[in-house]
Image: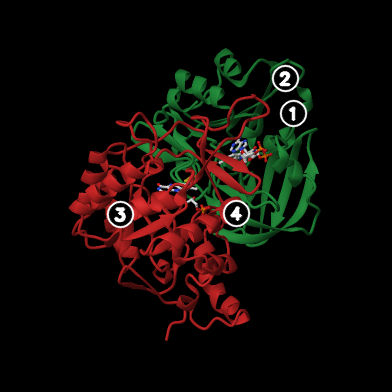
Amino acid sequence: MNRLEVELLGKKLKNPIIPASGTFGFGYEFAEYYDINILGSIALKGTTLHPRYGNPLPRVAECKSGMINAIGLQNPGADQVISTELVKLKKAYRDKAIINIGGHSFNDYIDTAKKFNGISNIWAVELNISCPNVEGGGMAFGTNPLIIKELTSAVKRVITNPLIVKLSPNVTSIQDMAIAAEEGGADAISLINTLVGMRIDLKTGKPIISVKSGGYSGVGVFPIAIRMIYAVSSCVKIPVIGMGGISNAREVLEAMYAGAHAVMIGTQNLIDPYACQSIINELPDVMDQLSIRNIRDIIRRSI
Amino acid sequence: MKNVFLTVKENRPLTNDFYKMVLEGECSGHTAGMFVNIKLQDFTLRRPFGIADADNHSITLLYKVVGLGTKYMTTLQNGVIIDVLTCLGNGFNLGKASKPLLIGGGTGIAPLFKLAKELKSKYPNIILGFRTHEDVCMIHEFSEFGNVHVTTDDGSYGYKGNVLSYLKSTGIVYDYYYACGPLVMLKNLTSIDKNGELSLESRMGCGFGACMGCSIKTKSGYKRVCKEGPVFNASEVIFDEQT
Ligand SMILES: Cc1cc2nc3c(=O)[nH]c(=O)nc-3n(C[C@H](O)[C@H](O)[C@H](O)COP(=O)(O)OP(=O)(O)OC[C@H]3O[C@@H](n4cnc5c(N)ncnc54)[C@H](O)[C@@H]3O)c2cc1C
Ligand SMILES: Cc1cc2nc3c(=O)[nH]c(=O)nc-3n(C[C@H](O)[C@H](O)[C@H](O)COP(=O)(O)O)c2cc1C
Ligand code: FES
């Protein structure tokens, strides 16, 4: 009996540890560092319909307890992800991964998501709705419940894989966004994406990031993430995948108590390439200390 | 890439704000032009530094104090153990030159030291550029491996001017160059001659290819400074869009 096993959307995961999108590339490069088959699953780099270079440099700024990134969804585009990146992933990883999708219009999301129907090493689609909505005047999709519901159902209609909607924390009521995604037909919710942040270079007096602001992530966002995981888990029936600032096994358990069925590890992978492996190895001991027999028993226990 | 724990063996100033640090431990696998990414206590992101010298048991870094992280590095005492990602990046292509020219500006001299050492048999020309005489260092060390030319912006040591005006004003014979230094220097160099390679810097999230934080545009597509670089063919790099 595997004490770390959890079930997510009908799929058994060896453990609840999933590298978060954008911090693990397309996975295979981490196979040079450790056996990535130990992971619960993998969330791949945000993919768009067409190739994107992303934002000009600098795209990263350090913060006391985290970092700001404004990568701007650099990726080779859905077709090349399928023809090249996923083929490389298949050689390094026996299981299926989660494709993360970004877009700037309804059609972007729909057309991109559809391309991953029937792709043999993809088992779920994660919708990153934090991108600016070009048609809607640049406001992020993820801050308007009506748009979330409509977008979720539009994508759900055309895909064959389970749909995870990834929520942005930059909203006044995260519950409203989660309910909108559930009503739109989402199979699961993941949260949190990054918080909008900015740093200014004292030498130049100008923002460090080329596009001025970016997404703040890392250990500093952990309490915000826990509160939002808790709030969302309390108001929807679909499973929640928790993330935001998780850097060790204790924090994994905390996120699961708050309601997470599985967790994603982001920024910590960039600081310590072995982070997910270390956390997986650390979990049984920490569970022993807390007299937790099976990790799935603690999900939602704080609610 | 390797994740190793290295012990500080030496950490001392060469000039006012330019330090030499020697770290000992498992250091095999480094070639000239590679870099390391150092975890500093209480700083979120690692700090990248070129390899100035390396053998199987030690690496040497030459670093300038520019901000809080490098300031903290100056306080590290001998015996302190630090977490380092080693053997990062691609390194210089040593086979390209029969008459090599090395051009370093400011902290850009650091990765050229190991390169000069490895090109010793070809006795390279080495142009080292500094702001002023107070910054000048490593001249004797470089002189063991090649013919060293020094420039300072204010003329207080060696030639008055920058490395490029020096290069243009003298008839140094070379067939291939290796350069590292400020972006403007590299950009102006490529407008004179593209037959060489450049070691670039970029703010990094990870340093090992995972975040896309460091990508630049090149003629053959987007490249990560930390993975496909930091050394690029001078003819490949597209400058205008990344500054
Ligand atoms: C591949 C590579 C090799 C390098 N080799 C050397 C070397 O041999 N010697 C040397 O003196 N310096 C080198 N640098 C620059 C060095 O990394 C920075 O000076 C250092 O990170 C500054 O840290 P700080 O905390 O003092 O500065 P802060 O400004 O306080 O740093 C804040 C953040 O910005 C980043 N940052 C600031 N300046 C730079 C920069 N120029 N390049 C990349 N990131 C920066 C820091 O890493 C940190 O994440 C290299 C950079 C790269 C990318
Ligand atoms: C460099 C970087 C790139 C990211 N790229 C994406 C992305 O492409 N798609 C996405 O949905 N989230 C992306 N994220 C957000 C993370 O997946 C995660 O939601 C967030 O960073 C919070 O978790 P953390 O604090 O553990 O990093 C990115 C984060 C970082 C740091
Ligand atoms: S710094 Fe993360 S990919 Fe280069």
Residue at mark 2 shares a chain with residue at mark 1:
yes
Q: What's the CA distance linking mark 4 and mark 1?
A: 41 Å
Is the residue A168 above or below the residue B156 in the image?
below
Residue A219, numbered circle: 4
The type of residue carrying mark 2 is: Gly
Q: How far apart are marks 4 and 2 (CA)?
A: 49 Å
Which label belongs to residue B158?
2
Q: Where is residue B212 in the image (x, y as percent from the top left)?
A: 44, 43
> Which quadrant: the N terminus of chain A?
bottom left
> Which kind of residue does numbered mark 1 sit on?
Val
Q: Give how far across and how far down residue B159 sits, in percent.
A: 69, 17
Res A129 → quadrant: top left
**Disc 3 and disc 2 in contact, CB within 8 angstroms:** no
Secondary structure of the residue carrying numbered label 4: helix
SS state under label 1: loop
Whether tag 2 and tag 1 are in contact, CB under 8 A, the answer is yes
The amino acid marked with disc number 3 is Glu
- Residues beneath discs 4 and 2 located on the same chain: no
- Pinpoint the chain carrying mark 1: B
* Mark with earlier residue (4, 3): 3
Task: Judge the density around disc 3: few (<14), some (14-19), many (≥20) Cα neighbours within 10 Å.
Answer: some
Report the chain shown in red: A
Q: What element carries label 3?
A: helix
Q: How is the image coloured?
A: by chain
Q: Is mark 4 within 8 Å of ligand 2?
A: yes
> Mark 4–mark 1 contact, CB under 8 Å?
no
State the CA–CA distance, disc 3 to disc 2: 73 Å
